Image: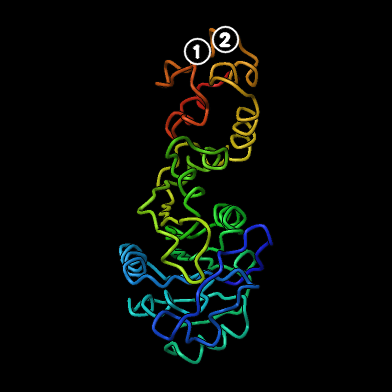
Amino acid sequence: MSRRRPASSSPRPSTPRTAADGGGHPLSRRHDLGQNDLVDARTIRAVVDAAAATRGPIVELAAGTGRLTAPLAGLGRSLTAIELDPRRADALRSRLPAAVRVVQGDLLTAALPRAPHVVVGNLPFHLTTAALRRLLAAEHWTSAVLIMQWEAARRRAGIGGGSQLTAQWSPWFAFRVDRRIPSTAFRPRPAVDAALLLIDRRRAPIVPSADRVAYQRWVGAVFSVPGAAALALARVDGTGRRAARERCRRAGIDAERAVSRITAEQWGLLWARRPR
């Protein structure tokens, strides 16, 4: 990974490492760039297997030292690796097959293909939300295989309740946590666990794409009202509590629960049945 980490999220101190565990790589100790390299072979295999289950060219974000890039290249598909650190980018070019395109660039701004493709990445933890917002607003990619902070992945997948960001994008994307990844799978070791999050673009959106801006604005307004779902809907849509509870009932929603518990399909029903 290759973005600067704020002081508040510095990784735990790590013990000296040998070539066997990644310490021998000349570019593996760039703490100042927030780099937490994935070193666990089982997790690397899981990421590559998840990518292998998709179709199309692959774009890897934050390629780092290439621990994912090299096995991804073994899939025999078109592969572009994006890496911010110019030294690491040069090292990747020297070690990877010539067919792998290495781009020195920022994962938040680097151009993505204007054709169907798959995104893979071990995201810098402090850039998780920014990277997700950038990807979700981007067109053309069909699936994403992403390593990120466990808490962020849990919220994206709606485990224990979804976030506003998830609710705003779930009509167009399906989110699923494949596995939890212990912090010991990285060097240097971060302070929190990670997760492997799989995202698939829905072939048939739950909400029409033409409604996206208005829908996302409406969801944001609903989330801004504290309390139960019926209360939030009544205030945002300008209806009485009784009418809001009836809308919840028809959508299969507990009117007294928090809006974070509403599923993608239920959000779609609420939007479709909103007062006009």
Q: Secondary structure at mark 2?
A: helix
In-front residue for pair 10/142: 10
User: Counting other residues with Cα less than 10 Å from the Cα at mark 1, is it few (<14), some (14-19), or many (20 or more)?
Assistant: many
Residue 30 pos. (x, y %): 60, 77
- Give the residue at x 42% y 17%: 250
| Mark 2 vs 1: CB contact within 8 A | yes
Label 2: which residue? 241
Q: Please identify the residue farthest to the right as the structure is shown.
A: 7
Q: Nearer the viewer, residue 138 or 188?
A: 188
Location of mark 1 (residue): 245
Nearest the camera: 244 or 114? 244
Q: Position of residue 73 (x, y in %)?
A: 38, 79
- Residue 120 percent across, percent down from the top left: 45, 65
Question: Where does residue 253 sit, x and y in percent of width and height?
Answer: 43, 21
Task: Please identify the residue farthest to the front as the structure is shown.
Answer: 15
- The Cα–Cα distance between marks 2 and 1, rounded to whole angstroms, is 6 Å
